[in-house]
Amino acid sequence: MRGILLVLALALAAWAANVKLYLKDGGYHVVREYKVLADRVRFYSVERSDWEEIPLAMVDLKRTQAEAEERQAELANDAKMLSDEDAEQRAIRKEISRIPQDPGVYWLDGNQTKSLKVAESSVHTNKRREVLKRLSPIPTVSGKATLEIDGMHSQNVFTNPEQEFYIQLSEMERFGIARLTVKGNVRIVEKLTYTPIIKEVEEEADMVDTFQQQLDSSGLYKVWPKQPLPDGEYALVEYTMGKLNIQVWDFAVKK
């Protein structure tokens, strides 16, 4: 990126170095620079690579100066855009350097990088409740269930309703923020409907609209809600649709 910015900067500098010296008859000379003398204009011709002179009465100085000022303003604006882009890239690189490469979910607290612990979730059917294991097989009978986390409230409480998280994926899977439902002494992550014939499960989670920014090609993303989150229980989830392959990092928002 820095190489691209340098090439663009050099191209802009070269572009700005040349000026059109307009003539009153409608023509112009492309010049590197010019000087207004008593009754003539002395200029360096880009076409002929040499100094030349022309009577001042033949030169449209007003148009020449107006265009030169306009081009300088455009150059200053382009230079600012390049500088802003370079600063943004430096900020992203600094951001990436603060996040561990180990798969997981992280957030920045001032100068500290902190991580969320994966929550232990359980599948609760009408007959039993068992801890969900990653890549667990689909049950052989049809039915409904819920994916739950023990406890009414998460121990990970954030006061910022627009909290930003970083997720380092171990493999390319879907992820997002789910709104949890508190029922009794558990928090429901999603509702499940098993279809054993095709060995899939329908998952119904209350997903929050989020922004997701990929920070590098290793699978590091930043995710944050599009709208401030109301007080409540949430979880950042990583999953494969229809496979009951989910990891849950729970948190709460309390302003």
Image (tube, helix red, strand yellow):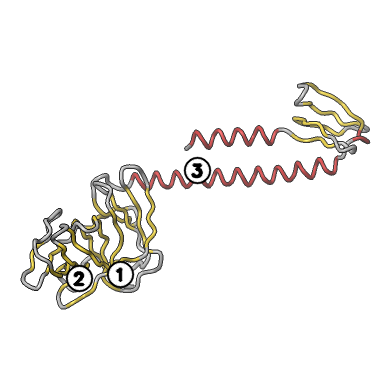
Query: In this orientation, which residue lies closer to the viewer: 238 or 195?
Result: 195
Residue 86 is tagged as: 3
Q: In the image shown, does 149 or 42 lie closer to the viewer?
A: 149
Identify the residue at image location x=89%, y=29%: 54
Residue at screen point 13% across, 69% down: 143
Going by the picture, which residue comes out furthest to the front? Answer: 197
Which residue in the structure is indicated by mark 1? 253
User: How far apart in space, not on screen, are marks 1 and 2 (Cα)?
Assistant: 16 Å
Instruction: Examine the rendered structure and indicate whether residue 175 appears above or below residue 179.
Output: above
Q: Disc 2 vs disc 3: which is toward the camera?
A: 2
Kind of element beneath mark 3: helix
Q: Which amino acid does label 3 sit on?
A: Asp
47 lies above or below 151: above
> Mark 2: which secondary structure?
strand
Mark 1 lies on a secondary structure that is strand
**Residue 205 image position (x, y, % from top left):** 26, 67
Residue 107 position by quadrant: bottom left
Classify residue 73 as left or right of residue 213: right
Q: How far from the left and from the top, in percent, is residue 220?
A: 32, 48
| Residue at 65 percent of width and 42 percent of height | 75
Q: Are marks 2 and 3 in contact (CB under 8 Å)?
A: no
**What separation in Å lies between label 1 and label 3 (alpha carbons)?**
34 Å
Using the image as rendered, state which of residue 156 and residue 59 is in the foreground: 59
Marked residue nearer the N-terminal end (1 or 2) = 2
Q: Where is mark 2, residue-wise?
A: 188
> In this view of the protein, which residue sits in the foreground, 117 or 172?
172
Q: What residue type is labelled 2?
A: Ile
Indicate the quadrant where residue 9 lies. top right
